[in-house]
Image (cartoon, helix red, strand yellow):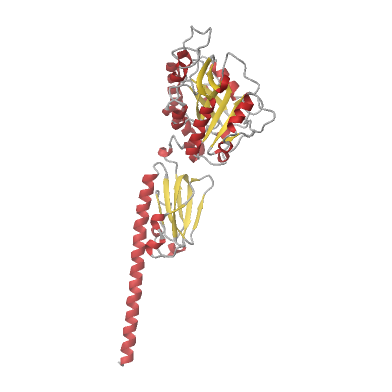
Amino acid sequence: MSYLGVARIGAAMEIQKMVRKEEQAKAAQNRRYREDLQNVLSARQSEHPGCHIVVYFRCGETASWSSGSQVLEPTVENDLSPSKYEWSSEWVSVTCVVYQGEFEYWHPGMKHKPWKEYIAASVPPESLDGASPKRFKFPLLPAWYNPLSWMRILNDDTNIKNITIPGSHLSSATEASLSNADHPSGQAGRSHKAYICQQETIATQLKMGVRMIDVRCGPEGRLAVDAYHLSDQVGNVFLTCENFVREHPTQTIMVCVSWGYARTAPPGNLADRINARITQHPGLWYTGSRWPTLGEVRGKCVLLRGFQAASNSNNNGPDETGHDMVHGMSQLRAAERTPVQVLGPNSLASLVGQSPAPTIAPAIIALGDAARSETRAIDARALNEGVQNLIRNSTGRRQGLWFFNDFVSRTVVESIARMNAGALSQ
């Protein structure tokens, strides 16, 4: 063999070595990426308990979510940076946090390589065949509930009147607030303990998952409970709610405002006073006259008024006075006068059977309020236990139930909030 022939063979062998070396390097990169992909999946699962995770390679892929899926916005996964594998900067990977839904993924490389080199998820795909698109079904997990963010799983286009909401009745009527209230003349025989409705402050109630509060106004901008004039200001309650939605922008709070001082009639300028306070932070309040979607009011408070609107203002909020849109406050007032043992339309009997999405207004359910007595805490807790058992043992779709609870508890709030997840799955 000539020298030239030997040289050509040697050059070809060197080229083959270089090709094999490049192939081995690519294979090592792919193995490293596949291992890192699984590590990232595990890390994100630990960061988001109660959720599903899917991490996938995004370059030339086809990815789609089914309608109704609850998925947070995909984020670029920095722990899978292309530079880490000496890849093009366009070859990024993304992570999705999923509450529930269906996902389909396809990458052209899956014709020749295992699908696990492109995608990792907390559930296996329906088919393990690498040459076909991967379809994943993510069921809602029992651990999805978080009292600080439970509204997050609900679709943005859900009308708020169709959400089942845990609330508190006479939200400010705690032992501490009533014991320091102005004692009304002529009421010496009535203990303030007969008016206690809550054990926790409004700030704590919101952290427990309550998303609807009952605010009763009195003279001088102060809170009131029947004939008791509390020391705290209505504006402070608004500030507490504003701070909460600012810190938890996926949530909304229904703020039901009415006149609550039995000693005097509401002043004619009540609406103007409320409006003046709310306009200090207009970006944190929804005051339109129509029922909004949840997406419109995430990170905002929704004013539900139990007083006549100011004729010269658009910041009045949906009507809660008993007229066209809602008759919530009038329902609530009637429920307050219903003995605890009578299960009328505003009590546990309202939960029996089907309760489909309402067409006009949510159903108001007042739990635990009865004739004024110092045993009301015992009565309320018995009813709260009853509603828990009823929710736990009932079947059927329920939307648009608004619960005003006395002595609201974490377990009751969670039971009520979870009713929304049941409606989503049907």
Residue at 54% over, 39% down: 298
54 vs 279, left or right, is left
Picture mark count: 0
Residue at image position (34%, 86%) is 8
285 up-or-down from 84: above or below: above
Instruction: Return the x and y of residue 341 as percentages of the image width and height.
Output: 49, 15
What residue occupies the far right of the structure in this picture? 311
Q: Residue at x 43, y 55 (%)?
A: 56
Residue 318 position within the rendered picture, expressed as x and y whole percent measured from the top left: 62, 30
Near-viewer residue (129 or 55): 55
Residue 426, visible in the rendered structure: no
Residue 272 drawn above or below residue 122: above
* Residue 120 vertical placement versus 25 (above, below): above
Q: Nearer the viewer, residue 118 or 293?
A: 293
Which image quadrant: the N terminus? Answer: bottom left
x and y, in percent, of residue 50 in the image:
40, 41
Outermost residue, front direction?
220
Q: Position of residue 104 (x, y in %)?
A: 48, 53
Query: On the rendered structure, is 42 left or right of 278?
Result: left
Residue found at x 42% / y 40%: 141
In this view of the protein, which residue sits in the foreground, 111 or 91? 91
Q: Report whether residue 166 is seen.
A: yes
